Every structure is written in structure tokens, then in C-alpha cells.
Image (cartoon, grey):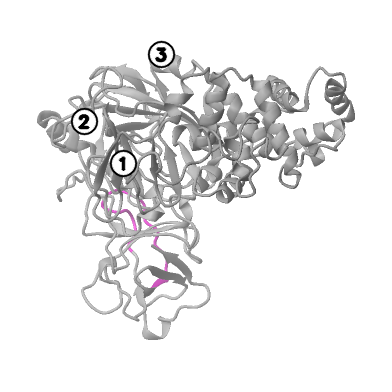
Amino acid sequence: MKRLLCVAPFAFVLILSACSPASTESNRPGLIPAPNAAAPGVQFARKRGEYLMLQTATGYIVKELGGTGAEVAVNGATSITFSDYSVNLSVGTKAKTIAATDVQSLIELYIAFFNRLPDADGLVYWIDQRKAGVSLDQIADHFYNAAILYSDLTGYSQSMSNADFVRVIYKNVLGRFDATAPPEADVNYWSNSISSGQSTRGNLVRTMLTSARTFVDDATWGWVPQLLDNKLAVGNYFALQHGLNLKTPEESISKTMAIALKVTSNNFTEAMNLIDVGDKIFNLSIATTIAPGGFTSPCPADIKTPLFDTSPIAIEDFIAFRPLGFMSAPIHMFPAKHSAFSMTPIGQTAVPKPVRSPGNVVVTEMYEASFSTGAKNYQVFMRPCGEVRAYFGHLVTISEKLLAEFNREAPKCNSFYEGNVTMTTCRRENLNIALSSGEQFGTGPDTAGVDFGVLDFRRAPARFINLEHYDTYYPFYTSPLDYYSADVRTAIENKTGNVFGTKMRTAQPIGGSYMQDIAGTAQGNWFLPGKNHKNSTDMSIFVGLAHDYVNPEEPVMSLGSSVKGAKQGLYSYVPTAQGVVNRDFKEIQADGRVYCIENFKSGQTTGGLPLSNPASILLLWMPDYSSLKLEMVSVSSCSASNLKLTSNATLFVR
């Protein structure tokens, strides 16, 4: 029996992914190949998350995020191997050979029987089986036969009663146990379906999955189909969008189970973070070189070629255009990677104005964000061409054209905690909606202004000190000003400055800078040990030591909630040229000395942001070049006797 089911001692993963009852030891279709067997030489030494992958007309470009930023063209390969994952490049194409609902059913079977994500190689195998005529019920029976052989992992056993089998389904598949366990009447109903011969144990799982989905929006049990949808979304992301396989059978079992266990009915962010790919743009299920008119050619090779010719907000409708580098707790603890149109004077109610397409673009994603405070807004993501992505945030409405597409099918929703607010984001992805230059696609702002961000994957990544702490997008942000025709750029530059429009940025680049890390100094972005931009949605706990986005000579600290004794917010001071008191961040080094800041400025930064003005001092000490200790001390001066950190100091790392 074990031989019939492909149960090799070293390869339990094969049962869960890529073997069939007809397989033998010498002929196992769909087994995970030896690394890079399909494409000799296409191997990369680092983790998948340390590379960007872009699709081309003939294959893929794999771009190194750190080091030299080298690019490697990969053509004619069916897989690419990294140090942590291999990528099956055929899964997206294979998935289109059967019904989309069948693909989703296959992914759900992995979740239902093993509470794990599918690996791409295994998914491809079962897609081929389905294409060859094997029914989903037959495939479900194969999964059940594999599951009972490893009852300690799955909870299923051949000797268990039908009633106990149903209870395990409720627990593993529907998340219902203990306080939410099913009543005996429900258990008896489903177990009788097996006893009467109406169902097999294998296909009953599929029947119960279908039944669970009828409870969408149910006040009591609506969380059950939402849990299934969230696990399905993560499974799609892992196997179908990114084509991932772990390097060993043991890893495939343990890691994909661990990821699935992190999914809840209202949050899958932690599960996505465990996948540690970061390259969210890459998607094997769609073409990724998107340009106006559809899925066509990549961007011009010359990054100086203008892509935009329309100001999204009419020049007379905004007060100022904010450059990169804005900081404001609790969201923008680090210099902001996007710009914004400042539109609402302080103390006044926002008046929505038209937001227009900056050029000929294709809308690829839309997000609807709602907050526990009752607020709501939209984000719209678009591309003028393959490697450049622009986005707009804080829209109060989107056009009827976009809204109709957003509502065409149910969006994917996820909730997470940000600062002291719970945010729920509902997403529609993989869209292809053409907008012509100047076409209105929404109105904004919802509050103070409209965000405008641009990413360009043709550029070298920004040299943050530790790219491991950021998602793949982060190093590729750039100023939207760089993409405009000369006349429109000049018009927007003339209004580039602080939120009030009273002080303009004159330092180059006019579009600002969000990468302010300086190696060997205290200047830059600081994280808590074990938490960073890649694995945490709560930025409010970190610290940014940078400079004002309008006046780059003015030091500004963004102190998070983890600095004991300090109020979360912005701080500034007048820098000195020597000693350890009030030195600029770029002068603070790991030289054994404790540095101190006193006499904090009051009022606002040059950029117009409110400052905290405590009668305390802040101590800073770098034990080494990759760590920093901070402590706010309730004394008034940086006298020598006060330059001593205590156990209240908070450790931050690069």
C-alpha cells in the first residue's frame, strides 16, 4: 500500500504533492527534481527574497538587490534555484489548462487534508492529473489515503469512526473545535452521509468545503469561509503566483504547515511574512510586462525618458507638493518613500478634487482601506510600462469605471494593527484597466492630501544598510518628478515644499530623498531586534534619525513607542560641531562615547510638522556600527554626570 501511494521513507512531501496511486519507486511523475535539473547552470547563491524577478518576452531577468545589483537573463528554463527555494516557472501556464475553480479546489485539498500550502511542483502534478481526466473526488480520495498514513500529523486514521472523522474535518478544515465545535446533530448528519455510501471520506471533505462557503456574511459563522479564503489566498501566493518549492521534503512539510497555522479569519499578514519572498510584483499567473493597452513591452531603457505629462491634481487645486523624506509618527517613522499633494489647510475640512491619470497607464491593482475609526479610502496602482509602477493613496472615491471593476468579483480582505488603529484592506489584483493621460479616475483627498508614489525597477536599489530588513519594493522608490515632461515638472517643482506651501525645498534633488542611512553612524533607520519592515506591520515601534524633507540641514528624530520615557513623535535640535552634546546624527559613531541631546526645539520643523519639546535629555550610544541604544532621561542638561545609560535604554539594530 505504501509503495502504491508513493510513500518513500525520505519523501512524505511527495504524498502531499506530486504522486499518484499509479506511481512506482522507479517511475514517480511529478517528483521534485534535483536542484536545477530542468535548467543546468541557472542557480543563485542567495535567498529568493534577495532578488527581483522580471518577466521578459523570452524569459526572465533575475536582478540582485544587494551587492553589485547584477542582472542575469534566464531564457528557456523551467525552474530557477535559489538557496532557500526553487521556482517552478511553468505553474502559471499549467494552471490555465484547467478550470480556475479546479485549480482552487486542488489548493484547498492541501489545506483541508494537511493544513499546509501546496508546493508548485506538486500542484503542477495534480493539474496534469485533472487535465488527464482524474476527477476532483478521486483526487480527494488519494489525498485521504495519504493522510491516514501519517495520522500523527494530520489527525486522520483509518480506524477512526465516521463521527470522529467528521470532527477532525471541522477542526482541520473549518477551524471549529473547543468552544466552536459542531453539535452532535451536525456530526451525525455528515457521518451518516459516509455510512449510507452517499460519500467517501475523501470526497466528503469537498462537500463540506462547499457547504461552508454558503455561510459567507453569516453573523455567527461568516468567519469560517473567511478563514478558508485567507488560507486559499496564501496558498495561491506561495504556489501559483511565486511557483515556490522548498529545498527538501522535510522543509516542505514543516514550513508550509507552519505558514498555514499563522492564517486567521481576519489576518494573513504574518503568514505572508513567513514566506519571505518580498517580491510581490512577480506573478507567474499573469504577464508582468504591462504597458498601455495591455500586456506588452517593457519600459524604455533610458530612465530619463518622460512617462508622464499630466499633473494628477490640477496646479490650482493643491497647496504644495511634498518631496520624499517626510516623517510623522506613528506611520512614517522613517523618511517617507512617496510624495504627496498637500490640499487641505489646517483646521479645514477636505474638499475632494478630481484626480487624473498622469499619463497613458494600465491600472493593475486597487485597494479599499477601512479603519476602526470609521474612515475609509482607496489606493490605485498603475503602470505606464512594465518596470515602473505608480500609485495614488487617500482617494475618497474612485471613478465608476474603476468601481465597476473593483466590484466585479469579491476582493481579498485582510486586517492588521497599525499604531493604535485596526486597518482592513480589501484588494483586487491582476487587473488590466487602461487609462488615457488626463482621464479622471477618482477624487481626493479623504483628509489632508493625496499620496503619489513611484517605483522603478530599472534603477539600482537604494543602498540601505541592511536590505534584509525591507520588502523587495522598498529600495526602488523614487521621486515622481523624475518621470515628467519638462513643462509639467517645472510647474510641480515650483510648488514643492512644506505642507503649508510657505517654504520651498531648494536643495537638490528637489524631489527629496528617503534613503538617509549612513554606514558607520547613527543616521538612518533603526529597528527592534527581530522586528523590521519585512515582518512587522506596526512601524510605530521603530526609530528614524534623519533630516527634514524641506531643509536637509535640520536633524529630525522620529521616536517610536519603544523608547521609554519619550513621547512618540518628532524631535529636533540645533546641531553642534564638536563634543558629544547635540551632534548631528551623521557625526555620532561607535567610538565608545555616550552622546547626548538637550534643549529640544519647540514649534515645528521647517517642513511644518509639530515637534515634541521635553525638558529631558536623550542619550545615544552605539555599542557597534549595527546597534544603537537610546534612553530618555528626566534631567535638564547633558552634564558629564548624566551621561550614563541604565537598564531602561532600548536597543535598536540596523
Dot 3 corresponds to which residue? 400
Amino acid of disc 3: Glu
Quadrant for the C terminus in the image:
bottom left
Residue at x 56%, y 37% (from the top left corner): 415
Residue at x 18%, y 47% (from the top left corner): 505
Residue closer to the observer: 419 or 104: 104
Q: How many marks?
A: 3
Q: Where is residue 320 shown, x and y percent of the image?
A: 24, 37
**Residue 382 disc label:** none
Distance from the alpha carbon under mark 2 to that under mark 1: 21 Å
Dot 1: element: loop
Q: Where is residue 170 shown, x and y percent of the image?
A: 76, 33
Q: Splitting the image into 4 quarters, where does residue 511 fall?
A: top left
**Residue 11 as seen in the image, left or right of residue 593:** right
Amino acid of disc 1: His
Dot 1 corresponds to which residue? 338
Q: Where is residue 24 shown, x and y percent of the image?
A: 61, 36
Dot 2 corresponds to which residue? 299
**Are the residues tagged 2 and 1 within 8 Å (C-beta)?**
no
In the rendered structure, does residue 197 fall within the stretch colored magenta? no
Name the mark nearer the viewer: 2 or 1: 2
